[in-house]
Amino acid sequence: MEEIGATRADYAGPVTPQASPDNPAGPPAGDDSGPGHDADHTVPEQDSGPEQDSGPEQDSGPEQDSGPEQDSGPEQDSGSDRYHERLAVPLWWWLAAAVLTGVVGYEIQLSAHRAAWSWVGYVAVGLLCVWMLWSLGRNTVRVTADQELHAGRARLPRAVISRGATIPATAKSAALGRQLDPAAFLVHRAWVKTMVLLVLDDPDDPTPYWLVSTRDPAGVLAALDLPDAAAEAGAEG
């Protein structure tokens, strides 16, 4: 009768062949050595399953437009003005300044006995003349797009002007002489022959009227949408 039972070798599990001259590689790769397996054996990484898709990316909607860029207002330049004029000095003044520069510079050169530095007199006199003529003619008269008169640094809104009139060269002397109101506001340049008269209607301003030098008084009145009282009076007479 055959004996039924388990030998000691049966409980020990499969025997792993040891490295030997006949088998230098040792145990085959991936071979499990049973309960007494080597501590260097790596447990295969557990697959956590297919990656969970968080769904389509949430669109925050179309980008919010902050609207058109706010403009700080039209730039104040002569291109947007209804009228613009610079009260520059006459051209012949520049020619006279060039002659004066030559005469005075030559006198300085003679006084210095034609020394090497004496040419500096021409430069100094020339620069002085240029600065003086530029300073005299730098003021402007202009009417902005909203019909505000700028005469030099002074400003006059259209709303306070009741009427206007042109002052021809023949009447300029009287307007600045016996007919002049001491409370009137003047922007006068002697080399500009004509002027414009603007009568005010402002209870908060004691100034009765403005007298402003301009080479085109009719153009100033047209830019302010004012009729020429002098022309109307002449037509009636």
Image (cartoon, rainbow, N blue to C red):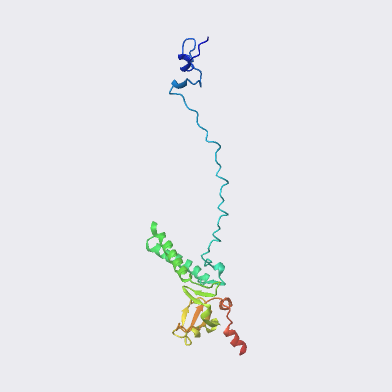
Comparing 86 with 142, the one in front is 142
Residue placed farthest to the left in the image? Answer: 112
Residue in view at x 59 percent, y 84 percent: 231
The location of residue 54, given as percent across then percent down, is 55, 44
Residue in view at x 37 percent, y 63 percent: 111
Residue placed farthest to the front in the image? Answer: 1
Residue placed farthest to the right in the image? Answer: 235
The location of residue 97, given as percent across then percent down, is 47, 68
Q: Is residue 12 visible?
A: no
The location of residue 119, given as percent across then percent down, is 42, 59
Comparing 218 with 57, the one in front is 57
Quadrant position of the C terminus in the picture: bottom right
- Vertically, is 34 above or below 60? above
Occupied quadrant, residue 82: bottom right
Comparing 100 with 151, the one in front is 151
- Vertically, is 17 above or below 75? above
Comparing 130 with 37, the one in front is 37
Badge count = 0
Q: Is residue 160 visible?
A: yes
The location of residue 210, given as percent across then percent down, is 49, 81
- Vertically, is 69 above or below 158? above
